[in-house]
Image (cartoon, rainbow, N blue to C red):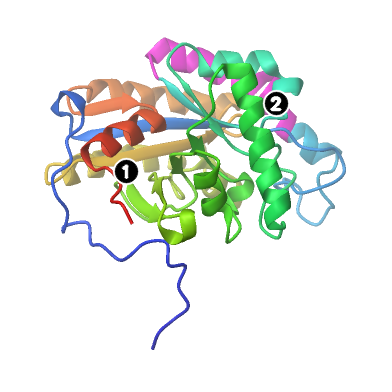
Amino acid sequence: MNLPSHKRFDYNAIHDRPPLVWPGGKKLAVYISVCVEHFAFNEGRGLSYSPGLDHPNTYNWAWREYGNRVGGWRLVELAKRHGVPLTVLLNTACYAHCPDLVKALKGADGEIVAHGRTNSENQNGMSVEAERALILEVTEHIREIEGEAPLGWMSPGANPSVQTEDLLQEAGYRYTMDWPMDDQPVWIRAGNHGRGHLLSMPYPHEVNDVPAIALHHMTADAFMQMTFDNLDQLLEDSDQQSLVMGVTLHTFIMGQPFRRRRLGAFFEHLAAHSGDIWLTTAGEIAAVFETQFPAKAG
């Protein structure tokens, strides 16, 4: 039986690949992404803290805004204290809403990844023309503020359309974080009538505080135990081949005081394994992978 296919990439088992080498001979590349998001008030989409009520409602909007006013700043302090570079998944609406927070999160060694204009909307269901205009607007906004265009994209709500990858390749993006299907980067077909390429970066769909805490109601301890166990297991797995681990945090979730207290312990755990871990950003991982395994023509 032939099921409908996305036709973006072929099946390739993890054990059937050539050696991948991270800088310094490290076994495991690790990046920490922080989502910085801004929502329209009383319209559009949003993650509901109060099920059964229309959202974004006052309570729900304010829950998200805590991340921009308080939680994000606390995460900046924690990351600086432990020397952790951040991959910042940015709604460009935050440049007008909380520009100093964006600057602080990126810091001197972080990276900005385009995350749409706002999580009050997503691309799925947009016309090709509307989505192309959205991607161009976001790209140029980041270029104007940061001095260079972003190389990575993560769709708002992790909900791209069927044409998103083609439009990203057309706009000059090098990688996407919308396909969480592997522990190594994977080239996917995108644009140029199926002959172009876009790198799919490993993205954590479970070691991610939204599904774990907001949707599956994990405690702070349970979520942090997940990060510890994921790191320890991937370190064992990477004895066989170099791998990638990501952790995704949202300012309004992990920026809460009681959860942030547990996050510091995980950053200490990363430092304890510094001999085996390359702690970096998603863009640096993509660049090293592309150097060793360039996309094949055609």
Provide the residue designation for mark 1.
230
How far apart marks 2 and 1 lie (CA) works out to 31 Å
Residue type of the residue flagged with mark 1: Asn
Of the 4 image quadrants, the one containing the N terminus is bottom left
Query: As rendered, which of 294 and 208 lies closer to the eye?
Result: 294
Magenta stretch: give its range.
64-84
Name the disc covering residue 94, or none. Answer: 2
Circle 1 crowding by C-alpha within 10 Å: few under 14, some 14–19, many from 20 = some
Q: Residue at x 54, y 42 (%)?
A: 154
Q: Is residue 255 above or below residue 40?
A: above
Q: Residue at x 57, y 13 (%)?
A: 104
How many numbered discs? Answer: 2
Circle 2 crowding by C-alpha within 10 Å: few under 14, some 14–19, many from 20 = some
Principal SS element in the magenta part? helix
Query: As rendered, which of 215 and 38 lies closer to the eye?
Result: 38
Query: As rendered, which of 213 and 85 lies closer to the eye?
Result: 85
SS state under label 1 = helix
Residue type of the residue flagged with mark 2: Cys
In which quadrant of the rendered view does residue 171 lie? Answer: top right
Residue 60 in the magenta stretch? The answer is: no
SS state under label 2 = helix
Residue 71 in the magenta stretch? The answer is: yes
Q: Is residue 194 above or below residue 36?
A: below
Q: Residue at x 23, y 43 (%)?
A: 293
The answer to whether one can see residue 73 in this image is no
Name the disc covering residue 49, or none. Answer: none
Residue 191 percent across, percent down from the top left: 49, 54
The answer to whether one can see residue 56 in this image is yes
Q: Residue at x 67, y 52 (%)?
A: 123
Residue furthest out toward the bottom: 1
